[in-house]
Image (cartoon, rainbow, N blue to C red):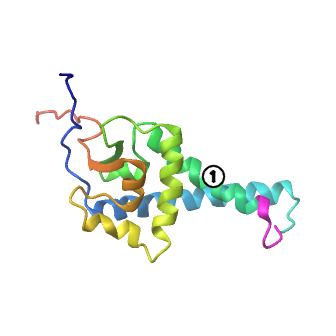
Amino acid sequence: MLPTTSPPMLEPASLFRRLAAFSYDLLLLAALLFCFTFIVLVVRGGREIPPGSVWFDVCLIAITAVFFAGFWTHGGQTLGMRAWRIRVIADDGARVDWPRALLRFAAAVVAALPAGLGLWWSVFDARGRGWHDLWTHTRVVRSEASSARATTPPS
């Protein structure tokens, strides 16, 4: 009989922590998209970007996808997730790779479309997974403190 390894038992992140981390991330992402837009305006000599410019919309979506997927593949945490001590892992406990992270981003967009129903699903799932987690075999779990803080006794 082959030995099987079961995924580590980690506490699922609550919906509150997930939403709080996402709120932090939206602030960072808005600043990043603002900087990109500013650079585009400077390069265009101050001329406006015509409404409905497909290239610009694609750039904004790509920046957003790379923002989330990049953080998920490097430590499993966006900056907001780090602040709220949660992280994304594969169901088997492994790190999330680029294909899975990009698929997770796309699945999260789809899960958010029907009034966020796919995201709220995590309240009803025993392991706290939203539709995008179920579809991509990932989960968001509580993590230990990112760095141990040394305490110095008072002098």
Q: Residue furthest front?
A: 1
In the displayed structure image, the side of residue 129 where residue 72 appears, left or right: right
Q: Secondary structure at mark 1?
A: helix
Q: Identify which residue is drawn at 87% across, 58% down.
A: 44
Q: Identify which residue is drawn at 87% across, 66% down.
A: 47
In the displayed structure image, the side of residue 142 where residue 33 appears, left or right: right
Q: Which residue is mark 1?
A: 63
Instruction: Measuring from the top left, give residue 109's x and y in whole percent.
Output: 52, 63
In terms of depth relative to the viewer, which is nearer, 145 or 100? 100
Occupied quadrant, residue 6: top left
Q: Main secondary structure of the magenta part?
A: loop
Q: Identify which residue is drawn at 42% across, 57% down.
A: 132
Magenta-span inclusion, residue 130: no
Instruction: Measuring from the top left, give residue 125's x and y in whole percent.
Output: 25, 62
**Span highlighted in magenta in the image:** 49-55
Instruction: Measuring from the top left, give residue 119's x and y in whole percent.
Output: 38, 66
Q: Quadrant of the C terminus?
A: top left
Instruction: Measuring from the top left, give residue 21's x and y in whole percent.
Output: 37, 58
Kind of residue at badge 1 = Ile
Magenta-span inclusion, residue 51: yes
In terms of depth relative to the viewer, which is nearer, 30 or 52? 52
Q: Identify which residue is drawn at 39% across, 73% down.
A: 117
